Image: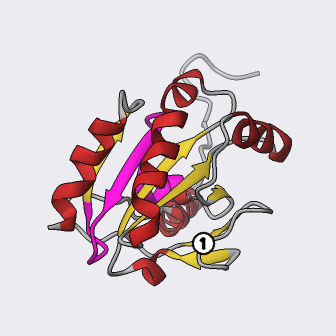
Amino acid sequence: MTKPDQRIEKRGIPMWTQILIWLSLVGLLVLVGFRLKSNQTPMAEVGKPVTDFKMEFYEGYRYQDRSEINLSDLRGRVVLINIWASWCKPCEQEAAELEAAWQHYKDDGQVVIIGVDYVDTPSGAMSYLTKFNITFPNAPDKDKISRILNRNMGVPETYIIDRDGVLQYVKIGPFESLEEIISAIDPLLQ
């Protein structure tokens, strides 16, 4: 039995154990931070060069008889990249205009239009491309092209890159007309 004036000694976690726990937590946070930083993809900014990436086109789609191409291979041309999805209703609104723009520019070789299919199924993508008679090259977003170009604002999104590989124009949402597309591209052909 204890006397009323006796105190029960409480034992806490030893100081060296507390320090070890805190150092472990800080180390874990540092590791997570480095991992997150290494996973970040640089995003394109208007007025700055776009990070190079590869596009592997869907079967039946080619550019200059090639089934895959790097963005850097297109230097010297104006490149319009449209990010779309088969489930996207606003994408359907601009499909005909993008195809008309491709028909307008394809013969002189100064402008390349490429579609990038975002978060889709291959069958959904092929149905969409067939439904809208899309003939310009299209690629699935296997290499996370959309992450390089955008901040995941949604689809459709269009990026126009000048002859030197510099992003010059961003359009969030669908184009309303062929004239709107031409007015975004033609100044870069001067």
SS of the residue under disc 1: loop
Quarter holding the N terminus is top right
Kind of residue sitting beneath label 1: Tyr
Highlighted range, magenta: 146-167
Residue 149's place in the image compared with 173, above or below, is below
Residue 45 vs residue 37: left or right?
Answer: left
> Where residue 11 appears, x then y in whole percent?
62, 43
Residue picked out by circle 1: 63
> Where residue 116 appears, x then y in whole percent?
58, 52
Neighbor class of circle 1 (other Cα within 10 Å; few <14, some 14-19, many 20+) is some
Residue 135 vs residue 110: left or right?
Answer: right
> Where residue 35 appears, x then y in whole percent?
55, 66
Quarter holding the C terminus is bottom left
Residue 91's place in the image compared with 171, above or below, is above
Residue 155 in magenta stretch? yes
Depth check, front residue: 39 or 169: 169
Depth check, front residue: 149 or 32: 149
Residue 95's place in the image compared with 59, above or below, is above
Depth check, front residue: 145 or 136: 136
